[in-house]
Amino acid sequence: MTRFNWQNPYPTPRLPVFARNIVSTSHPLAAQAGLRMFWKGGNAVDAAIAAAAAITVVEPVSCGLGGDAFALVWDGAKLHGLNASGVSPAAWNVDYFKRKYGEENGLANQPKRGWDAVTVPGVIAGWEALHAKFGSLPFGDLMEPAIEIAERGHAVASIVAYKWAAAVPELKDQPGFADVFMPRGRAPEISELVRFPGHAKTLRKLAEQGPRAFYEGEIAERIAAYAKDGGAALTAADLRSYRADWVEPISKDYRGHTVHEIPPNGQGIAALIALGILDKFDVNALTVDRIESQHLQIEAMKLAFADVYRYVADPRSMEVTPEQMLDDAYLIERAKLINPKKATQFGFGMPKAGGTIYMSVADERGMMVSFIQSNYMGFGSGVVVPDTGISLQNRGCGFSMDPKSANVVEGGKRPFHTIIPAFLTQKVDGRHEAVMSFGVMGGDMQPQGHLQSIVRMLDYGQQPQAACDAPRWKVNHDFTIDIESTLSAETARALEGLGHTIKSVDDPYMDFGSGQYIWKLDRNDPERGYVAASDSRRDGLAAGF
């Protein structure tokens, strides 16, 4: 039985939601789309796909039909992992970028936006794989809510409108962007009605012809033709050959539970490394929001990132395995590097040989889905295929241009990925039982959000909404620290006193992520259902019945 402190010490407009069937997403209309599938008799996977389709319409600042996805699915007895991140066009390599963009300091220049940041979109193949393995309703039914919203229009939500306006100056000149996302020559305002007829047409074709139509047939031909017109390397053959992959999740034990992540090419392993390091310390003996606890978590995260940035890539190119990076003896040695009285600039270790949306969905039959999809930096590449509503991600900029890197750009390869779903289980009588489906959106914030949430719940007994609302910090690539303005000034000063370089950031939507959590209340009494939380940093909603 769950034993949380149900009080919430942090200012928030949200309360935990209790129900037997729950959809928790970053937009209310997407949550309602998922609930519609439950009312039709569908399961958690049906609800997740419907919500995912709807959110491409109502939160285009974060994801689209040309994005990527990952999922962890608890089928009632076993956890399954899905990698639906796309691969690079076959023609890509370092010389391709040198020829087109020149070089600087001996490395090819790399575009952040536009066609040469676009890898094969994986999200629709992800929906296809999920539906084929677990879906119970016809695929066309799952598209119905999204089609309706795209055709009839919806009033733009507050945080979506804010991020939309912020993206326009950089993306307004990208191919197809202004026609779809600046219908009045600007970003829409809060509550303004927007319709996406092209988006609806594509969803209808997927509903009628099946998700494979995105990669073969008319839709694929339109994407490939627009890519060719734009001088891009992406071809119909690249699209046709793509499939999402079922993968074995990786995991680490922590405080009597097991945390599960998708294996590389994603960064979920960073959360597991950091938790494996923290497991060597008595975190519970430290006060939750005070300097000692926060410093320890930050240092563990820095150690994790030092290894992740050095080693993680497409698993076919990695020089060490996830098992080596998570080896307990190795993590004990890494933990010894933490100085409780001083911030340290860590280097990577030597393991021994041997723009995003997240949603959580659970049903009364015990199926739970941890799902994430993204276009990366907000709208992604900024490229939108005319009359289709297909806005394309920019995951190609996740590659390295350094030929010595395991993550160097090559044709048919997956880049380093930031988006990561997570799952929590507990071993009972020798087998794993589901505990929580969860995730946190926001680039490099994601494994850090996983770490901070798990510590708050398992070490300090905070209920999911409180753990979600608590102030966050974020370790940057240069190991400086962003801190949310709600973190106490005393703790911030103390962190600086230990040598951390602190920046205070007032944009929680982008810098500190947004989480959704569904926790199973009692494994021995399924009738009690679940408790869900939805992050107040976005427009989200946890809804259930």
Image (cartoon, helix red, strand yellow):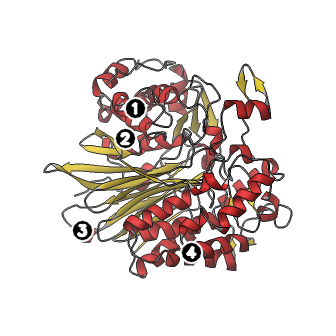
Residue ranking furthest to the front: 237
Q: Sequence order check: which comes first, mark 3 or mark 1?
A: 1
x, y percent for residue 330: 33, 22
**Residue bearing the label numbered 3:** 526
Tag 2: amino acid: Val
Q: Name the residue carrying label 4.
A: 209
Crowd class of label 4 (few under 14; some 14 to 19; many from 20; radius 10 Å): some
- Residue 287, can we see it? no
Tell me the kind of residue under disc 3: Pro
Compared to residue 6, the image places residue 302 above or below, namely above
Q: Nearer the viewer, mark 2 or mark 4?
A: 4
Furthest toward the left, the residue is 429
Q: Earlier in the sequence, mark 2 or mark 4?
A: 4
* Residue 369 makes an appearance in the image: yes
Residue carrying label 1: 293
Q: CA distance from mark 2 to mark 4?
A: 45 Å
Front residue (pair 259, 343): 259
- Label 2: which secondary element: helix
Rendered residue at 48%/28% (across/down): 311
Which residue, given by chain and number where applicable, does mark 2 sit on?
Answer: 455
Q: Are marks 4 and 1 in contact (CB under 8 Å)?
A: no
The disc label shown at residue 54, or none: none
Asked if the residue at tag 2 contacts the one at tag 1, i.e. Cβ–Cβ closer than 8 Å, the answer is yes
Q: Disc 4 marks which amino acid?
A: Gln
